[in-house]
Image (cartoon, rainbow, N blue to C red):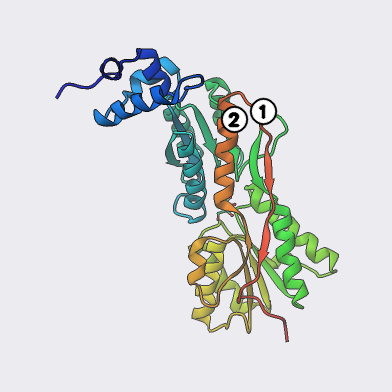
Amino acid sequence: MEKVTIKDIAREAGVSITTVSRVLNKKEEGMSKETREKVLRVIEKVNYQPNQLARSLVTKRSKMLGLIVPNISNPFFPELCRGAEDEANKSNYSLIICNSDDQSEKEENYLRLLKEQQVDGILLSSKDQLSQTSKIQLQESKTPFIIFDRGEESNQHPGVFLDNEKGGYLAGQHLIQLGHTQIACLTGPTNINNSQKRLAGFQRALKEASIELPESFILTGDFQMDTAHRIAREFLPNNTVTAIFACNDLMACGIYQAAHEIGIQIPEQLSIIGFDDIPLITALIPKLTTIRQNTYEMGRKAIELLINEIEHKPSEGVIFEPTLVVRESTKKIN
Ligand code: RIB
């Protein structure tokens, strides 16, 4: 079957090619409702599939956006991608989702690939700070981009982040209000901004309450469940903490596993608070108390800013507020 072209639609509808093109590109100001509907009826009748490549040559837009995340296996990131995808689809953009596996090299390769694909914009949650190469790639490609979740907040470039310091503070404050004084913190990787800020907020809460946090109670994790499990297996039997703040929910899952294996009851013998509020944790018993990030909305907002950048509209960066969600894994000390 011959491929239907925009010319065929124009002939069939009895309008000009420009009119059909305006309908396809949703630039219908001043066009009568009847004309628009006539064109749409023909488009539907002939099942017209626009040639995206040809279209992008005319509009200079590929209608594709790149989204780079550091670890797609962590359920936090698919949630972020969902918000981004839904918002992108609203404006007829498709997403190319890339997973950098926390490796600068992979991130740099993906930046190169996205440039080759001529994406209209890039959303980047970097491994930690942008590598020098990534920075140069972004500057040189002149592709609009937004940094979100991880990376540096900057006045020069809008981004979407969480107030991570406040999140850590809320976690500390909650445990203190329950009467805990022997509290450990399992951090994320020390080179990640998010992770440093969560610890700083937690330390601030303890300091305000004049509670000591010995160095040995600060455990360095990597946001991964297995590592958290291993660390907790070593730490819990040899220490007398009554509470622990895990700087993300996946690590809280690892602590649950270790506590179960050692025979420590949650929350009777150990209170645990996580961070993120990933959907998976609703299956945990007891249900995990956590610091919630509005992850879906962050992904959505980041795309909104990116589209503003692409369309040269003014946009301002956003810092989301974390909230405490009290469930069953934290308890007043007896
Ligand atoms: O769980 C993964 C963590 O890494 C989240 O807390 C998120 O903020 C990200 O940076």
Q: Quadrant of residue 55?
A: top left
How far apart marks 2 and 1 lie (CA) works out to: 7 Å
Q: Earlier in the sequence, mark 2 or mark 1?
A: 2
> Is mark 2 in CB contact (under 8 Å) with mark 1?
yes
Q: Quadrant of residue 24?
A: top left
Kindly identify the residue that appears in the image at 59 percent across and 28 percent down: 309
- Amino acid beneath label 2: Asn
- Compared across the picture, whether 152 is left or right of 66 comes to right
Q: Quadrant of the N terminus?
A: top left
- Amino acid beneath label 1: Pro
Kindly identify the residue that appears in the image at 71 percent across and 81 percent down: 332
Is 288 situated above or below 120? Answer: below
Whether residue 230 is visible, yes or no, is: no
Residue occupied by mark 1: 314
Tell me the tag on residue 308. Answer: 2
Q: Position of residue 96 (x, y in %)?
A: 42, 37
